[in-house]
Amino acid sequence: MSRIPSFENYPDQGALQSSVRANDISARAMDFPFLALLVSGGHCQILKCLGIGKYSIVGGTLDDSLGEAFDKTARLLGLPVGGGGGPAVEALAKDGDPKSVKLPIPLQKRKDCDFSYAGLKTAVRLAAEKICVERGVKSVDELPHEEKANIAASFQHTAFRHVEIRLGRAMDQVQKEDGIKTLAVVGGVAANKELRSRLEKLCSDRSEPWEMFVPPPRLCTDQGSMSAWAAIERLLVGSSDVAEDQEVYARYPFSFAASNINEP
C-alpha cells in the first residue's frame, strides 16, 4: 500500500489537495497532469499537479495572498467584509473605471512565476490618500461612491493583470517541459467573475488553446466539500496516515510531499 504523509497539519498542502480537486465534485474528473492556480485568502500559488499528493510549486507569493489584498482594500474603502472582502470589492468595481487610478503591476522586472501583493496594497492606500487630498476630504470614507468604485476597479484590474502575467509565464513553461495544456483555477478568489472571464481568455487566446476547469462559485469557498472529496481520492489510491514507517515533522515542508511517498 502506498502511503502519502498527512496533509492535515500543514495548511498549504491541505488547502491545495482539497482545492485542486474541487472541480471533480461538479464536473467530469480532470486527468493528471495539469497546472493549478490556487488563489484564496491564505494562498497564492501556481502548481504543477502530477497525481494525488504529487505537486510541485511553479510560483508562489513572496508576501501576501491575493485574497488578503482584496480584504485589505475592502477595509480601506469601508466596505462590509462579513462575507469576505473579495465579493465586496468585486461588486463595487463594477461601477468603476479600471484605468482611472494608475497603480503599478508588481514584480515587472522579475521574469519568474512568483507573486507579490504587499506593494500593491500600499500603492492603493497611497492613491486613495492622494484622492482624498485632491477632493478636500479627511478620509476615504468621505469619498463619493464613484471615487471608491474607481479605486476598487483599478485595484482589481491591476491585481488580475499581475496574475495573468505570472500565470502566462508558468503556462509557457509547463507546456514546453511537460506538454500540459489544462488549467484548474481554485480557491475562494476563483469565484470572482472578472477573474474567471480573463483567465478563460488567457487560455483560449494561446496559439495552442488550453482547457480550463473552475468550480461553480458556491464550491470555491466550500472547504467541507473540498476536504471530503480530497479524502475520498486519497482512500482510492491507498493513501494512509498510519504512523508506522513515517518520519515526524513539527512542520511538514511542502517540497517533501512527493519525495517522501513510500512505494508499495
Image: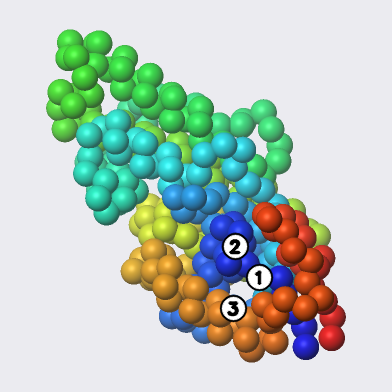
The secondary element bearing badge 3 is classed as: loop
Label 3 vs label 2: CA separation?
Answer: 26 Å
Q: Is residue 208 visible?
A: no
Q: What numbered label is drawn on residue 9? A: 2
How crowded pointer 1 is (Cα within 10 Å; few <14, some 14-19, many 20+) is rated as some
How crowded pointer 2 is (Cα within 10 Å; few <14, some 14-19, many 20+) is rated as few
Q: Which of disc 1 and disc 3 is earlier in sequence?
A: 1
Q: Residue at x 60, y 52 (%)?
A: 45
Image position, residue 1 (x, y; %): 78, 88
Image position, residue 50 (x, y; %): 72, 71
Image position, residue 111 (x, y; %): 71, 37
Image position, residue 235 (x, y; %): 62, 86
Q: Is residue 240 visible?
A: yes
Q: Amino acid at mark 2?
A: Asn
Q: Amino acid at mark 3?
A: Met
Q: How many marks?
A: 3
Q: Which residue is mark 3?
A: 30
How crowded pointer 3 is (Cα within 10 Å; few <14, some 14-19, many 20+) is rated as some
Q: Are marks 2 and 1 in contact (CB under 8 Å)?
A: yes
Q: Are marks 3 and 2 in contact (CB under 8 Å)?
A: no
Q: Amino acid at mark 1?
A: Ser
3 lies left or right of 117: right
Label 3 vs label 1: CA separation?
Answer: 23 Å
130 lies left or right of 257: left
Q: Residue at x 79, y 66 (%)?
A: 247
Q: Nearer the viewer, mark 3 or mark 2?
A: 2
Q: Nearer the viewer, mark 3 or mark 1?
A: 1
Vertical relation: 228 (above or below) 169:
below
Q: Which residue is mark 1?
A: 6
